[in-house]
Image: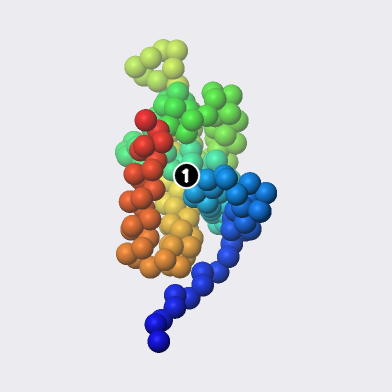
Amino acid sequence: MSARPEPRPADPVDAIIEQWARVRPDLDTAGMEVFGRIYRLARAMGDRHEQVYTPFGISRGEFDVLATLRRAGEPYTLSPRQLSATLMLTTGGMTGRLDKLERAGLLRRSPDPHDRRGLQVTLTEEGLRLIDEAVVAGVAEQSRALAALGEERAAQLADLLRELLLATER
């Protein structure tokens, strides 16, 4: 008696693929299966991160600004233009985030000593403390989600996604 593989549980993307197969059996839905799941995962994890960051008084977008400054290393300073480029935001969108974070005492804007027309944005001590705590909470949430795969499969997935991202962004 041969062992039969256990059926995989269906997800919402499977239902969409089945619907397309019924009405358009000629359609190659392999891409839909992959990108539909990537989109749903990104949205679900984005929602979970939003919940994780709420106790810190910040949104995901504000987290991204603080995290970008933190990753810059000491003195945790970048120009608004550098922040906008890294986060792929318009200057208007960045200004709103910076205003809110500055009012909360998490960063400060000051004249750029190397460019009279420019500004620099720097994490405050409170901003540094907050981002260090928030990033731990965010990474813990990601680890909880990846636990469903196990370490080896999570590493394989990361490698496959890196390969796909590089090919897509060329």
Q: Give the residue displayed 36% in from the left and 19% down from the top.
A: 113
Q: Residue 11: which quarter of the image?
A: bottom right
What residue occupies the far top of the structure in this picture? 116
**Residue type at mark 1?**
Gly
Answer whether residue 110 is visible to the viewer in this image.
no
Q: Give the residue displayed 57% in from the left and 51% down from the top.
A: 40
Placement of 3 over or under 55, stated as above or below: below
**Residue with the mark numbered 1:** 127
Q: Is residue 132 left or right of residue 159?
A: right
Residue 103 percent location from the top left of the image: 59, 36
Placement of 70 over or under 144, stated as above or below: above
The C terminus lies in quadrant: top left
Answer whether residue 135 is visible to the viewer in this image.
yes
Q: Give the residue displayed 32% in from the left and 39% down from the top.
A: 73
Placement of 143 over or under 46, stated as above or below: below
Q: Is residue 76 left or right of residue 49?
A: left
